[in-house]
Amino acid sequence: MKVLLVFAHPEPRSLNGSLRDVAIAELLAQGHDVRQTDLYGQRWKAVVDRDDFPALRSDDRLHPARASAEAFASGTLTDDVREEQEKLLWADAVILQFPLWWYTMPAILKGWIDRVYACGFAYGVGEHSDRHWGDRFGEGTLAGKRAMLVVTAGGWEEHYGPRGINGPIDDLLFPINHGVLHYPGFDVLPPFVAYRLDRMGEDAFPAMAEALRERMRNLAITSPIPFRRQNGGDYEIPSLRLRDGLGQDTVGFGLHQDPGTAPC
Amino acid sequence: MKVLLVFAHPEPRSLNGSLRDVAIAELLAQGHDVRQTDLYGQRWKAVVDRDDFPALRSDDRLHPARASAEAFASGTLTDDVREEQEKLLWADAVILQFPLWWYTMPAILKGWIDRVYACGFAYGVGEHSDRHWGDRFGEGTLAGKRAMLVVTAGGWEEHYGPRGINGPIDDLLFPINHGVLHYPGFDVLPPFVAYRLDRMGEDAFPAMAEALRERMRNLAITSPIPFRRQNGGDYEIPSLRLRDGLGQDTVGFGLHQDPGTAPC
């Protein structure tokens, strides 16, 4: 497989950096082609602004979605953004690796999403009408590819458990797994999450590294999270409300997984 | 009251800009003192990197939390960060206004959190031991102040409803309301959310503006979301797991609200 790893930590000599090296070494050992986007190494521009749309006239109002759609359609997005889109199109699998800062990704990675996910590329794809609300949530430009988060957290696993104070980790990551990855079409694998990073002794690293290697070895065969497809019949259109009778035993984000296709 | 509004949209002539102007005008009309952080206007630096810690030697490993703690303790954080911390200490109420991009805040606002929320200021406050896991979630530097989100979304309200495909808006905003605002001590008010922004006709603006004015008029008296306090007895320490017997009728993020103190 062709694998793109997007890395969002400012220090290559960090534990995050070591885990990144472990993942890449294992992917190469498995015979995969690997490319990397090292956001700090590339000094990635994090903020969507007028400079992203060179064709915009200086007195034009900046409407980010419209400007993005026009620049994508006319091929005038900036080189850095087009290069990342090309990497996404090239990849069979995409890994986003980041430390959990304030319960989500660091700004530099959010800015990669905000800028690379252009209108016409990651959203605004397919028919948009009262009968079909775009090709998204399981369909779209990146359909057929796999994606997976590799996340490090300072707190304890219990703190992110079903009754932990931070909220369940799968719910905290839902806006990313479902809203950022499933949205443009990815099959989303369960995340790899490493806890207690800040106080972890060196003796704990080998087991964590081996767990990550195992996930890398199984990248092609791990069952995805069974998120429902928007256009698979489970949702009313255009309200995009889950049909009555589905997900009766659950509430919240859990509604958007189909228990019938859950991995064994 | 003293009110700080943090604004995160790149175009002042946008609908977001108009709503910001409406909010500020109403706050001033009510006699409040208002300051603003216009992140795009200030060309806010969004990314945490070595430049944030001038005291760090060039060959030192960058450990963001440790570097942040040292810089905060020694008064060597950069001027832009210290100015925002001073504004937060000044304010009685803080409003974060942003468009929902990929189900959360734009990178520039995430970078304001990542940088301004230094260790010793917004986290790492109070005793950290197996008996007391810091002053957080209802306690901390910003305790006694109010905070509120003002959010615009392109999609329909139904899409963010209890069974809507995006997930319920209160769950999508939980990592911000609970993890970013309640964490350092804020009392968090229910958010103001404006839907269907992209296709809204001009005739819909007056009603939306009036609804926002109403929220501004009630800023001092609106009941906060009844998030549980970490150190109020509801959680086991140090697992930070909600005690058995509490929140029996719910799961997920909803566990962390106390139904006994819900607003009427």
Image (cartoon, coloured by chain):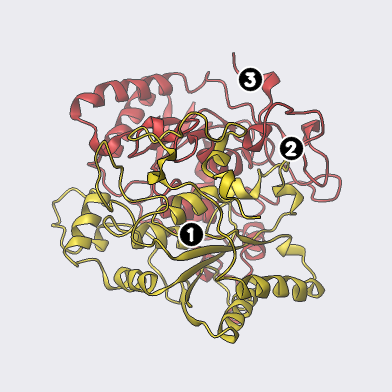
Chain colours: A yellow, B red
Both on one chain, marks 3 and 2? yes
Foreground residue among B60 and B251: B251
Q: Nearer the viewer, mark 1 or mark 3?
A: 1
* Residue A79 located left or right of residue A8: left
Q: Label for residue B230?
A: 2
Circle 1 Cα neighbour tier, 10 Å, few/some/many (<14 / 14–19 / ≥20): many
The chain ID associated with circle 2 is B
What's the residue type where badge 3 is placed? Answer: Ala
Circle 2 residues within 10 Å: few <14, some 14–19, many ≥20 = many
**Above or below — where is A112 with respect to B14?**
below
Labelled pair 3, 2 in contact (Cβ < 8 Å): no
Label 3 or label 2, whichever comes before in sequence order: 2
**Chain where mark 3 sits:** B
Residue bearing mark 3? B262
Q: Dot 1 lies on which element? A: strand
Which is more toward the observer, A55 or B12? A55
Q: Bin the neighbour count of mark 3 within 10 Å (Cα to Cα): few under 14, some 14-19, many 20 and up.
A: few
Pinpoint residue B102: horizontal percent, then vertical percent.
41, 49
**Residue B188 placed where, x, y %?**
56, 31
Query: Residue flagged by tag 2: what amino acid is it?
Result: Gln
Of the residues shown, which amino acid type is indicated by label 1? Asp
Kindly report which numbered mark, 2 or 1, lies closer to the viewer in this rendering. Answer: 1
Is the residue B178 above or below the residue A122 in the image? above
> Mark 1 = which residue?
A187
- Count of labels shown? 3
Q: Which residue is rendered at x = 82% and y = 44% of the image?
A: B132
